[in-house]
Amino acid sequence: MSLHELSDEQRDVRALAARFADEVVAPKATEWDREHRFPKEVITQLGELGLMGVCIPTELGGAGADFLTYVLVLEQLSRGDAGLGVTLAVHTGAGTMPIIDHGSRQQIERLVPPLAQGHEIAAFALTEPGAGSDAGALLTRAQGDRITGSKQWVTNGSHAHVFIVFAKDPDKPSAFIVRRGAPGFRPVREEEKLGLNSSSTTDMTLDETPGERLGWRGHGLRIALSTLDGGRIGIAAQAVGISQAALDLAVAYAKERVTFGKPIGAHQAIQQKLADMQTEIEAARALTWRAARLKTAGRAHTVEGAQAKLFASSVARRVTGDAIQVLGGVGYTKQTAAERYYRDAKVTEIYEGTSEIQRLVIARALLGKLARG
């Protein structure tokens, strides 16, 4: 699927996000990274543009676009700054959409509009020190509507207003909605990370914290896995955006840097590398858009989302490394954004399910019970 196959609305929203990334996000991204600063003012601007709720229905305060349009926005914003991209991805895909998909009418009407308009931020609290890929190993417990335990690596944790929290209830996981400021609920540590330094990643504790059940009791794992199915498409889009930024930088440098009397882009070794980079990015984008179209159509997309994330994240790691190679010594320094792209890319192979987990998802679809041991 090419740009020409997008609808007029999809192209217009993509162009809006691209312009915002180029004019507002990219010029500040290095500063945010260096200062480890969460850009609250930009979140407000995204809300005003309708991009904090791009795929949320208009009657709930969103822009009413489809899931593919949301993926297009994620790619463009991540091209400007991957930290901002994951902030939006978790806010929308992991924090807001589960309320729409599994919440009661009263929960949806009360909670979603402020999130869709960017007045509030959402987060997703599943991972624990002993429960990451093994989501069934949760130690956080719920007794009635009171939750006790701890959560790790909560994206948006220091700034979110609404948290989707998973806890054993009593023996099977349930999902709960917890609001910032609830008794016994607090961030205890802001994580120091390799990259994505403009995003917030926090450890949280809960001590008999009141929560509001989301969906049916004991259906938490089902809610978490269905949320991750869509979330992986968003992370694939983030990886594509990072890759595209790295390629754009490498191409611009190849046109300007002169060695042996001519631009390095005139050397076949550089041409070959850039050609491979672009081809892999286009393949990753195609897989990502395919998965997004399936979700938009309400069709099964578990395997396709896993394939998109698996491939796009590996492309991001390779392409950002190749961009540094094209730039040479300057690429290894902080004079350019190449090293930031390289640091930001790695986590796309880890969160929302590691690459190893994506391979398991794909293999189980191929082999059925045989792959489950």
Image (cartoon, rainbow, N blue to C red):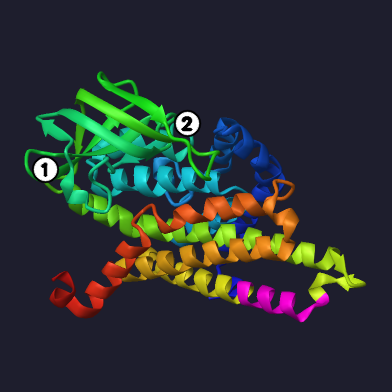
Judging depth in this view, the residue of 152 and 109 nearest the camera is: 152
Locate residue 212 relative to residue 312 in the image: left or right. left
Q: Nearer the viewer, residue 123 or 14?
A: 123
Amino acid beneath label 1 = Arg
Magenta segment boundaries in residue numbering: 266-277
Residue 249's place in the image compared with 108, above or below, is below
Across and down, in percent, residue 10 comes to: 55, 62
Residue at 22%, 52% in the rendered image: 134
Q: Nearer the viewer, mark 1 or mark 2?
A: 1
Magenta-span inclusion, residue 200: no
Where residue 298 sits: x, y (%)? Answer: 32, 65
Q: Which mark is residue 119?
A: 2
Identify the residue under disc 1: 217
Where residue 226 appears, x then y in whole percent?
Answer: 27, 56
- Classify the position of the C terminus by image quarter: bottom left
Instruction: Identify the amino acid type marked 2.
Output: His
Label 1 environment density (alpha carbons within 10 Å; few <14, some 14–19, many ≥20): some
